[in-house]
Image: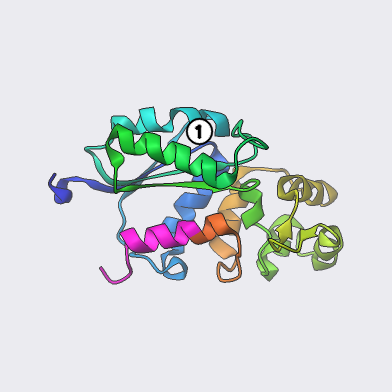
Amino acid sequence: MNHKELGDLVVVVPDANMEHTVTTLLKERYKSLGISNAISFKVLRLVGDSKVFNQAHELLREHQKNFRYALVMFDYEGSGKEGSWSREEVEQDVQKRLESAGWKGRCAVIVIEPELEAWVFAKSPHVAQVIAKGDATLLKAKLNGQIDPNTGKPRHPKELMEEILRAKRIPRSSALYLRLAKKVSLEDCRDPAFAKFCEVLGQWFPSGL
């Protein structure tokens, strides 16, 4: 394959929220991620986490000659495997199917447990600005007792975020995820899926190359 004729990366996601998050991180937060600022990428959407789990390998089969790398991302919650498989087992299953579809050695699967909103609650003042109209007191009160000591993140982040948005009468939209991805500090995110996201991109697209 002639890499000069290939796109760098194709990403499969389940919804507009994750699409906006990934696009913004790659385009605008590359320095924080420690990756190259010259990545050519395309985001494809399969509506729903379970559909991504079941069909991403088939969708990407037709793109294996067009891109150097493939990344599949979706939530554990909604994948259809909650409670029966671990997050790692879900990732491994999709990984094997991707490799069989022609992506061996150049693909990765990121399953976020329980869901994308887990990345929202970083230790950053921008979180309160975006989802609570700057009301840090409300945010702190809502987080009180909700943090899992083992993960450092809320046990039910999506429900918690929606509760805060309702309290401040903020419509839930994918634009919120774009704003969060632009502003929130990435350094304190302890989520293992986010750590894998950064590690994989750093290996594929190191800064300075």
- Magenta segment range? 196-209
Q: Is residue 205 above or below residue 76?
A: below
| Quarter of the image that includes the C terminus | bottom left
Q: Is residue 116 magenta?
A: no
Residue 127 seen in this snapshot: yes
Q: Report x, y in % for residue 207.
A: 33, 69
Task: Give the quadrant of residue 189.
Answer: bottom right
Along the viewing direction, whichever of 122 and 19 lies nearer the viewer: 122
As for residue 198 lying within the magenta part, the answer is yes
Q: Which residue lies at the image location 50% right of the left edge and 33% below the top edge?
A: 53
Which secondary structure dominates the residues rendered in magenta? helix
> In this rendering, does residue 73 appear at all?
no
Q: Position of residue 51 (x, y in %)?
A: 52, 28
Looking at numbered disc 1 in the image, what kind of residue is underneath it? Phe
> Residue 9 versus residue 76: which sits nearer the camera?
76
Helix, strand or loop at mark 1: helix
